[in-house]
Image (spheres, rainbow, N blue to C red):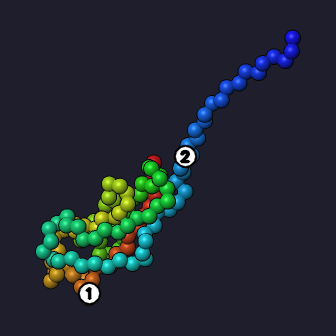
Amino acid sequence: MGVPAQKSEKVKIFVKLADINDHAPRFDMAEYSGSVREDVAVGAEVMRVDIIDADTGTNADVIVRLVGDETASFAVEVSDDQSQAIIKTKKQLDAERDFPPNQVYKFELTAYRYKL
């Protein structure tokens, strides 16, 4: 009879690694500075700050927040591609009425991981 013929078949397997939300978002510099004219429109963009997150896909989604006493004049949002925080004016600026001491607004920008 002999040895029976072995039947075998090769199958290709593709493995895709799933990213987990294991990297905190960060900024590429510790401090940023810019300037804005008092006559800009409400909602005018003041500056963009790059957000760096080694996660991918929805795990790279972030929430940003301004923290500090002088944030009433400014708002922040995240760009559509989640790569930048966009700081905008929230109200009409008035140098004579609103400027803090030394005519400098100071606040902190914080980025958080987005979790459902």
Type of the residue with mark 1: Pro
Residue 101 tag number: 1
> Residue 40's spot in the image, x, y percent?
15, 71
Type of the residue with mark 2: Ala
Can see residue 65? no
Using the image, determine if residue 37 lies above or below residue 79. below
Residue furthest out toward the right: 1
Examine the image and state in which quarter residue 3 appears.
Answer: top right
Residue shown at the point (21%, 82%) measured from the top left? 99
Residue 47 tag number: none
Residue shown at the point (17%, 74%) measured from the top left? 93
Using the image, determine if residue 32 lies above or below residue 26. below
Residue position marked by numbered label 2 in the rendering: 18
Q: CA distance from mark 1 to mark 2?
A: 50 Å
Q: Judge left or right: residue 9 versus residue 104.
A: right
Using a 10 Å C-alpha cutoff, classify the residue at mark 1 as few (fewer than 14 neighbours), some (14 to 19) or many (20 or more): few
Using the image, determine if residue 58 lies above or below residue 1. below
Mark 1 secondary-structure assignment: helix
